[in-house]
Image (cartoon, rainbow, N blue to C red):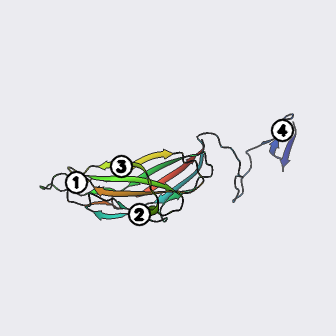
Amino acid sequence: MPEIQLNGKTIATQTGTNEPVLKNNGVMESGFSIPSGVTFPAGHVIQAKMAGLNSIPGTTSTSDYSFNYTDNSGPFITPLYNTSEIYFMFFTGIMTDVDNDSQGGNNGRATFEYKIGTDSWPTVNPNTFANIYVPGRGGNANMLTYTTSLTPNTLQSIYVRVGIKKEEGGRVIQMSADWGPNRVIMFEIAA
């Protein structure tokens, strides 16, 4: 079996007419990149990205969502392969303010949206992952988490944002780092 060595360390071997096998007893140099066209095994994490989410000031609106981004300054991931699945994990500090008074229910709603490409949010029809009920009865609610995935079939950037509004009641709903980490973690997974 032929092999290639450097200073007594085997870096590659070959058996018969089989493809050469690189050995894993070396150290990769900084700046090494995987060439295009590499096939990753299904389920392999191709890239991971964590980004902060801007806070959303308090609102009492029950008709319109207040969003943390209206332009392309928000978190995004750009797939390296158009067959990948993208996983999203949102960790948000969304709080509905409640006191023991006669105001009744003070529940809210959170929406998690995405768009593909660099067109601004107002000019696209954003896709909604989910609209989630944010309970507020009996105490303040915070640290809302949400996870989802999609297979976008694109190499364009995928932007995400969060919106909040009141479901009912006159007290405030807000998204603040005082109530949770306000982060999104995005993974590109090989199909």
Query: Given this view, does label 4 or label 1 mark the residue nearer the observer?
Result: 1
| Disc assigned to residue 54 | 2
Mark 2 vs 3: CB contact within 8 A: no
Query: Given this view, does label 2 or label 3 mark the residue nearer the observer?
Result: 3
Distance from Cα at disc 2 to Cα at disc 1? 24 Å
Q: Is residue 43 left or right of residue 136?
A: right
Distance from Cα at disc 3 to Cα at disc 1? 15 Å
Total residue callouts: 4
Residue topped by disc 3: 131
Residue neighbourhood size for the residue with mark 3, other residues' Cα within 10 Å, grouped as few (<14), some (14–19), many (≥20): some
Residue 159: % across, % down: 49, 57
Query: Secondary structure beneath disc 1?
Result: loop
On screen, residue 74 above or below 28: below
Mark 4 vs 1: CB contact within 8 A: no
On screen, residue 31 above or below 12: below
Q: Name the kind of residue labelled 4 in the image.
A: Gln
Nearer to the camera, 114 or 6: 114
Q: Is residue 165 left or right of residue 120?
A: left
| Disc assigned to residue 168 | 1
The first of marks 3 and 4 along the sequence is 4
